[in-house]
Image (cartoon, rainbow, N blue to C red):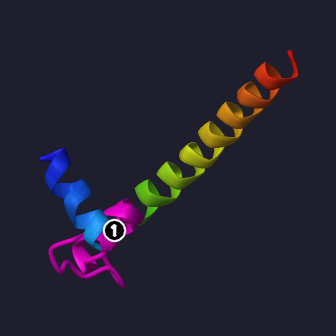
Amino acid sequence: MKSDITRLVNMGCYRGLRHTQGLPVRGQRTSTNGKTAKKMAKARASFLGDLCSRMQKELDKGRKN
């Protein structure tokens, strides 16, 4: 299943973009509903941003030594 999603993302199709943004993929309404999906997408983005910055700091620390 993960390989299917990565295939969609790599193709750059609409469904792949929705997966990367963490939004509903199958045509669900998001203006009035889908707030949970939007919150999860925002939380996932902030978590991944923090993780990337921590990993970059560790790499930089390793290069200095």
Which residue is the extreme one toward the right?
64
Picture quarter with the C terminus: top right
Span of residues in magenta? 12-37
Question: Picture coordinates of residue 9 (x, y %)?
Answer: 29, 64
Q: Nearer the viewer, residue 23 or 10?
A: 10
Residue positioned 71% across, 36% down in the render: 56
Residue positioned 31% across, 74% down in the render: 12
In terms of image quadrants, where is residue 52?
top right
Disc 1 is placed on an element classified as loop
Label 1 Cα neighbours within 10 Å, binned few <14 / some 14-19 / many ≥20: many
Residue positioned 15% across, 74% down in the render: 26
Residue highlighted by disc 1: 23
23 in the magenta segment: yes
Q: Nearer the viewer, residue 10 or 5?
A: 10
In terms of image quadrants, where is residue 53?
top right
Question: Picture coordinates of residue 23 (x, y %)?
Answer: 33, 68
Against 35, is 49 above or below?
above
Residue positioned 21% across, 60% down in the render: 7
Q: Nearer the viewer, residue 64 or 12?
A: 64
Against 58, is 39 above or below?
below
Q: Nearer the viewer, residue 5 or 7?
A: 7
* Kind of residue at badge 1: Leu
In terms of image quadrants, where is residue 41?
bottom left
